[in-house]
Image: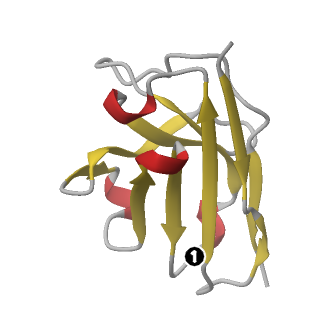
């Protein structure tokens, strides 16, 4: 059974930083392309970052230069370091293995809420 458990969200002021973590079980993590998605209120879920290896990453334009995705295959964990946060980054953040089409492969976890507000 696949389980995705996200953590690390919270309330942060604009310009602040957060580091999200996601532990995956029930998948062959080391060969999976992993990604972070986010869903803001009233909006569709969007893919913001993907990683195959530390040298093969991709980001949506709105987070380039501010977010860094990384992974630890020994811990079955993918991270998202979020810097210079903006109010428009407010959303529930989810991780998943990423299909070539960009959709998540497995059932979604509970996500972790990130709120950027002064």
Q: Which image quarter: residue 32?
A: top left
Q: Which residue is drawn at the image coordinates 52% and 21% (left, top)? A: 27
Q: Which residue is mark 1?
A: 85
* Render colour scheme: secondary structure
Residue extending farthest to the top is 1
Q: Which image quarter: residue 31?
A: top left
Drawn side of residue 103 relative to residue 20, left or right: left
Q: How many marks?
A: 1
Residue extending farthest to the left is 55
Taking depth in this image into account, of 47 and 62 the one nearest to the observer is 47
Report x, y in % for residue 37.
54, 40
Report x, y in % for residue 102.
37, 25
Q: Which residue is drawn at the image coordinates 65% and 83% (left, top)? A: 14
Q: Which residue is drawn at the image coordinates 58% and 87% (left, top)? A: 15
Drawn side of residue 49 relative to residue 77, left or right: left
Query: Does 107 appear above or below 40?
Result: above
What quarter of the picture does the N terminus occupy?
A: top right
Give the structural element (helix, strand or loop) at label 1: loop
Q: Which residue is drawn at the image coordinates 79% and 85% (left, top)? A: 118
Count neighbours of disc 1 (C-alpha within 10 A) and say few if under 14, some if 14 to 19, many if 20 or more: many
Residue extending farthest to the front is 74
Report x, y in % for residue 50.
36, 43
Report x, y in % for residue 58.
27, 49
């Amino acid at each position: 059974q696949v389980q995705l458990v996200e953590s690390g969200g919270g309330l942060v002021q604009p310009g602040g930083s957060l580091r999200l973590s996601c532990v995956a079980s029930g998948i062959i993590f080391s060969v999976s392309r992993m990604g972070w998605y986010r869903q803001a209120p009233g909006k569709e879920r969007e893919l913001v970052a993907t990683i195959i290896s530390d040298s093969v990453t991709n980001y949506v334009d709105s987070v380039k230069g501010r977010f860094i995705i990384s992974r630890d295959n020994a811990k079955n964990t993918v991270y998202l370091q979020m810097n210079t946060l903006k109010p428009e980054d407010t959303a529930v953040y989810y991780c998943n293995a990423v299909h070539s089409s960009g959709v998540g492969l497995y059932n979604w976890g509970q996500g972790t809420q990130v709120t950027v507000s002064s």
